[in-house]
Image: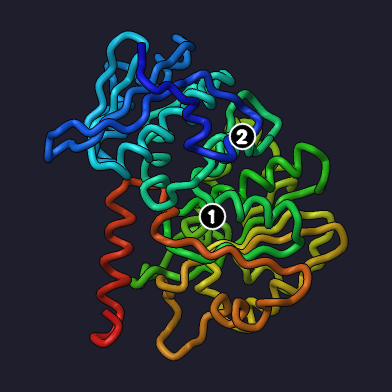
Amino acid sequence: MVPDEEKIIEVQKNSGSATTSVKTSKLVATGDSNRPFSCTLRFSNADALREVVGELGNHLKAIGNVLNVAIAQRGGEVTVLGEEEAVKRSAALLSQFESIASTGYNLTARDVEQSARLLLHESDANLVELFGDTIHIGVGNRRIHPRTLNQRVYLNAIRKHDLVFGVGPAGTGKTYLAVAMALGALFRNEVKRIIISRPAVEAGEKLGFLPGDMVDKVDPYLRPMYDALYDLVDGDRVNRLLDKGTIEVAPIAFMRGRTLADAFVILDEAQNTTREQMKMFLTRLGMSSRAVVTGDPSQIDLPRGQHSGLVDAVNVLSGVEGVEMTHFTAVDVVRHPLVARIIRAYAQAEKGPNER
């Protein structure tokens, strides 16, 4: 019998519409200076427990590594040992995972590690709502959902506003989520086409002469956009949509003189647009269209002395009705965990001596 049982849902408030059958003991002092507190969670849903634990306990190991706790499973019970705050966060995380797994969701190693890192920075993060905020693309059974709180803010902004800026470091999902939202809008017949653009600017090196016609020359700059499309939708279907012009991937220079009506338009790598290019792009929007602009002001590859259109637009358009800004940080990086540490290190190094 677990002493002093109480619903873990009382510890982690706002768990969304899902319920949990997990019960936990109150924190107990262990007398061990290395692992001074412990609590035990009892799972009544065996299927959910298997999903939470992971194959060979890999999910528990990942949580332990991120939150610096020791986790052990015995039957339907999971015991967490560590510092007080770490144990509380781990217990809340395990309880929320049980609620998510009980809906039939299959937790992946990436889900587990990213969620643990989120709770490390945002102790009151509601993972049940986060995982429940699914992007409905309309093809297959794949579920795309935000992995950080800022990603969820970003998605809600795209749903509610005609022009959204996603600004922040690489690896935060700005472009990928925008493409997913665009595909969902297309397949729900909310728009008639998708137009994805980016400036054809070399990243710090001169590529020299590129063979082929105009399409061949600009294609290397646009390849990341194709990668996102092929990752989200079957390749044959993407090719058909590209051939029909329903999806168009083109450099920003091709946008001049056009009116983009009934379209979902994405401008990627916008930090490498000039002020003139950004103004030209934003004024292309026609009726029943929406646009998402993404970029990282720390990775500007424009010639020295040329001002970034993204930085300028964020300053000029902040507060304008119908325009929404979402700012991402290293906490939102969903690539390899090392990427977030690299971004923070560079940001620190770029500060002046008096700012460190």
Q: Disc 1 residue type? A: Asn
Against 161, residue 225 (above or below) is above
Front residue of this view, candidates 230 and 51: 51
Of the numbered discs in the image, which one, if any, rests on residue 150?
A: 1
Of the numbered discs in the image, which one, if any, rests on residue 32?
A: none
The 10 Å Cα crowd at callout 2, few under 14, some 14 to 19, many 20 or more, is some
> Which residue appears farthest toward the left when viewing the image?
33
Against 27, residue 287 (above or below) is below
Q: Quadrant of residue 188?
A: top right
Q: Which residue is mark 2?
A: 132
Q: Where does the image place residue 267, in percent across and percent down from the top left?
A: 61, 63
Kindly indicate whether the residue at mark 2 contacts the one at mark 1 (C-beta within 8 angstroms). no
> Which residue appears farthest toward the right when viewing the image?
287
Q: Quadrant of residue 289?
A: bottom right
Circle count: 2
Q: Quadrant of the N terminus?
A: top left
Query: What residue lies at 27% left-to-right and 51% top-to-bottom?
Result: 338
Q: CA distance from mark 1 to mark 2?
A: 15 Å
Front residue of this view, candidates 30 and 127: 30
Front residue of this view, candidates 101 and 225: 101
Q: Where does the image place residue 295, in percent across and percent down from the top left?
A: 52, 66
223 relative to 259 in the view: left or right? left
Front residue of this view, candidates 166 and 268: 166
Against 120, residue 344 (above or below) is below
Q: Disc 2 residue type? A: Gly
Query: What residue lies at 40% left-to-right and 24% top-to-bottom?
Result: 24
Q: Where does the image place residue 229, in percent across and percent down from the top left?
A: 58, 42
Query: What residue lies at 26% left-to-right and 27% top-to-bottom?
Result: 71
